[in-house]
Image: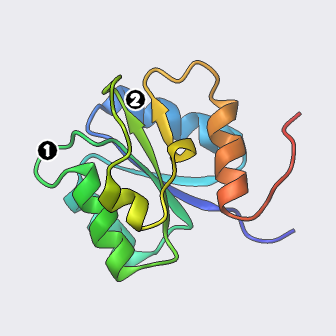
Amino acid sequence: MGRKTRILVVDDERMVRESLTAYLEDEGFAVSGASSAEEALSSIRDCIPDMAIADLRLPGMSGTELILHCAAQWPSLRFLIHTGAANYKLTPDLAAVGMIGDDVFYKPVLYLETVVVRILRMVGNVQSIT
């Protein structure tokens, strides 16, 4: 068995960040958290994760700015968006860096296994969850 998939959860809401981190750890991922885009960038510079899950509304740099910055610096880093903005539609600049509608999850996510399935597809480990 290879190394665990590394995921960074970026959300300024502590309870959201911690609950998503705990769920993903229970699913077998190596997960860390960041409360801002700036904290996330520092973490990514230390150890590039396989993917990150980012809220859009963050203090300071937005989630969109974080994703675009990372796409330029680390093109292999994949992102999911985890947003509370019910009417959010993927922007053209995010689509231009390879994001699609399936990469957006709206809070609260009722079935977190759908996030896990998307992660597995994105990192190339397509498998079913039992």
Q: Secondary structure at mark 2?
A: helix
- In the image, residue 1 lies at what x, y percent? 87, 68
Contact flag, marks 2 and 1 (Cβ < 8 Å) = no
Q: Amino acid at mark 1?
A: Pro
Residue at position x 67%, y 63% in the image: 123
Q: Residue at the location (22% across, 39% down)? A: 57
- In percent of width and height, residue 17 lies at 40, 36
Is 82 above or below relative to 109?
below
Is disc 2 surrounded by few (<14), some (14 to 19) or many (20+) residues within 10 Å?
A: some
**Quarter of the rendering occupied by the C terminus:** top right
Q: Position of residue 83 (x, y in %)?
A: 36, 33
Q: Up-down: is 46 above or below 15?
A: below
Dot 1: what SS? loop
Colouring mode (rainbow / by chain / secondary structure / one colour):
rainbow
> In the image, 125: left or right of 113?
right
> Is residue 123 found left or right of 54 in the rendered image?
right
Q: Quadrant of residue 121?
A: bottom right
Q: What type is the residue that disc 2 sits on?
A: Val
The answer for how far apart the CA atoms under marks 2 and 1 are is 15 Å
Query: Between disc 2 and disc 1, whose residue precedes?
Result: 2
Find disc 2 in the rendering and name its residue. 16
To which residue does mark 1 refer?
A: 59
Give left or right: position of 68 versus 6. left
Residue 90 placed where, x, y %?
38, 45
